[in-house]
Image (cartoon, rainbow, N blue to C red):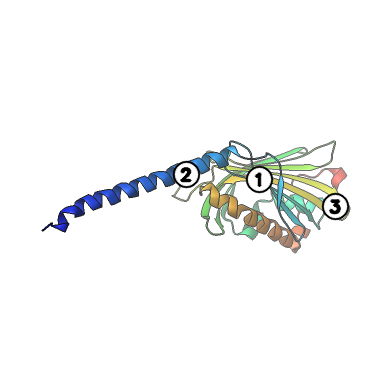
């Protein structure tokens, strides 16, 4: 009579070996998919959403895993109102920011820049983050467009607490006065510390929702009467 229990260790070892091989295959496949995705991309803008006057486009750069996003929208406002929203420190309060502080500010007739810090609770799955930013604003004298460049400045102040701090963020705004409003273009990229697959899937909806909220908030009295820190005499409100 053969004792079947004597074969159990052998079966267990073979099962573990098969599981190890399967795991190895999965890891190789995931690594291959990562390499393929990272190296892919046309480096051209592709429209991913066009709803309610808000156009969101995405760009995949070869060698980089995160997508860049561009938003084109028209604000039914004058230039001073748009500038006020995008440069005033307290604007963050209308979008859920807390612990807002201005670390440094320089304002001249031709250039404005400031370092700001705040905490923000982003939509799921992102959670709460700490943000330290450099904001730059200037007017192009030839085109009469205003440019606002926002960059992460994670080392501007020491860290305090265990809330994740954004280390990579770039958001470049271009404001063009037109008849009946302001044409706004925003080009952004951001690393929130999530796997890039989740970030790339979620960001178009997050960005579109933020722009929609900004457009609605601008209709309130605070922004209708706001005075921007930088506005040339040739670009006074209509």
Instruction: Tell which of 155 and 167 is nearer to you.
Output: 167
Please name whichever residue, 15 or 92, is drawn nearer the observer in this view of the structure.
Answer: 15
Residue 24 picture location, percent across and down: 39, 44
Is residue 3 found left or right of 151 in the rendered image?
Answer: left
Residue 138 vs 96, above or below: the answer is above
Residue at the spot 21% in from the left edge and 50% down from the top edge: 10
Nearer the N terminus, badge 1 or badge 2?
2
Q: Which residue is mark 3?
A: 237
Tell which circle, 1 or 3, labels the residue nearer the N-terminal end: 1
Q: Position of residue 40 (x, y in %)?
A: 61, 39
Residue matched to label 1: 188
| Alpha carbons under labels 2 and 3: distance apart | 57 Å
Q: Is residue 44 left or right of residue 119?
A: right
Are the residues tagged 2 and 3 within 8 Å (C-beta)?
no
In this rendering, would 237 be left or right of 123? Answer: right
Point out the frontmost of discs 1 and 3: 1
Residue at horizontal 77 percent and vertical 49 percent from the top? 184
Q: Would residue 107 be visible to someone looking at this image?
A: no
**Could you give the CA–CA distance between mark 1 and mark 3, rounded to whole angstroms?**
27 Å
């Amino acid at each position: 009579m053969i004792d079947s229990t004597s074969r159990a260790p052998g079966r267990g070892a073979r099962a573990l070996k098969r599981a190890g091989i399967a795991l190895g295959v999965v890891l190789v496949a995931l690594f291959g998919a990562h390499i393929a995705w990272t190296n892919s991309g046309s480096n051209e803008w592709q429209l991913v959403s066009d709803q309610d006057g808000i156009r969101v486009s995405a760009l995949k750069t070869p060698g980089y895993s995160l997508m860049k996003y561009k938003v084109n929208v028209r604000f039914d406002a004058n230039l001073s109102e748009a500038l006020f929203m995008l440069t005033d420190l307290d604007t963050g309060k209308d979008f859920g920011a807390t612990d807002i502080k201005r670390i440094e500010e320089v304002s001249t007739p031709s250039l404005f820049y400031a370092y700001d810090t705040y905490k923000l609770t982003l939509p799921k799955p992102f959670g709460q983050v700490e943000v330290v930013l450099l904001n730059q604003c200037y007017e192009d004298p030839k085109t009469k467009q205003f440019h606002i460049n926002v960059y992460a400045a994670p080392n501007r102040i020491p860290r305090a607490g265990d809330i994740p701090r954004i280390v990579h963020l770039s958001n470049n705004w271009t404001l063009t006065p037109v008849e009946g409003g302001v044409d706004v273009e925003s080009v952004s990229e951001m690393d929130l510390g999530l796997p890039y697959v989740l970030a790339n899937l979620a960001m178009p909806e997050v960005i579109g929702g933020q722009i929609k909220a900004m457009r609605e908030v601008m209709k309130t009295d605070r922004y209708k009467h706001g005075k921007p820190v930088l506005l040339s005499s040739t670009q006074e409100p209509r």
